Amino acid sequence: MAHTAAADGVCWATDAASRGGQYYFYLSVGSTAIGVVSGPTPKGPWHDPLGQALLANGSSYSPSTEIRDPAVYADPADGSYYIVFGTFNYYIAKLNEDMISLAEQPRYIHVNNIWAGQNGPNRTDDKPFLHSHTQPARGEVPAAPRYYLSYGAFYAISDSPYGPYEFVGTFIAPAKIAPDFRMPSDPEQPWYKQLDYKDRHGSFMTLHNQW
């Protein structure tokens, strides 16, 4: 991958997806670029189909965020795939069917009414993640999916993958954290700045119909 950080072996947050029998691994090349490699199995062998970054600061598209921490989302509503990325300011773009190019210019994701978070009110975090959930239909009306944008220990919900998202709160229940993963509390800080909520990066998935 033709990028300075790649030569230094700098690989930060990652995500993966599959489509058409091929697997795609998206990775942060340091803090300023996102690359993609592809392979026939989840363990490779991997090759670099672009020879350069998929997204990079300083390119023709250079938003007001660090281009890193990718998450790839497959929308069951229409089969589209999206890439979400950024730190504090998030962007989203639909991927082409080849999974290694963008079908559109990335769009800014608005998150409204952020009243809590490890970085304080009105601030998000790094490593965004996107998934959706469809509530059971009532009667004959199919239920529309709801989209969940999560970051750290907090999340927001929208009726569209593009947003805008309404902040909800945290998905962490400290009492249910394994004892070895609990952190010391600070009585001088509000609940949302306690270390139990700090850097809890995660992803959501289903296995045997269980989230």
Image: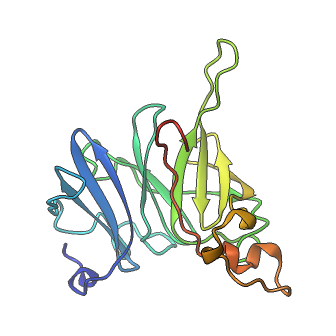
Say whether residue 184 is left or right of residue 27. right
Is the N terminus in the top left, top right, bottom left or bottom right quadrant? bottom left
Q: Quadrant of residue 179?
A: bottom right
Q: Is residue 26 left or right of residue 31?
A: left
Foreground residue, 44 or 165? 44
Q: Residue at x 46, y 34 (%)?
A: 76
Q: What is the basis of the colouring in this image?
A: rainbow
- Is residue 161 visible to us here? no
Quadrant for the C terminus in the image: top right
Q: Nearer the viewer, residue 83 or 191?
A: 191
Q: Tell me which residue sits at (74%, 78%) in the image.
A: 193
Residue farthest toward the front in the current orientation of the protein: 179
State whether residue 179 appears in this view. Answer: yes
Q: How many marks?
A: 0
Q: Residue at x 58, y 57 (%)?
A: 109
Whether residue 69 is situated above or below residue 92 in the rendered picture: below
* 121 relative to 185, above or below: above
Examine the image and state in which quarter residue 53 appears.
Answer: bottom left
Residue 74 x/y as whole percent:
42, 43
The residue at the far top in this view is 140
Above or below 113: residue 5: below
| Residue 136 relative to residue 22: left or right | right
- Give coordinates of residue 142: x percent, y percent: 61, 20
Q: Position of residue 20 (x, y in %)?
A: 23, 38
Residue for point 77% across, 60% down: 113
Percent coordinates x, y for residue 2 in the rendering: 19, 75
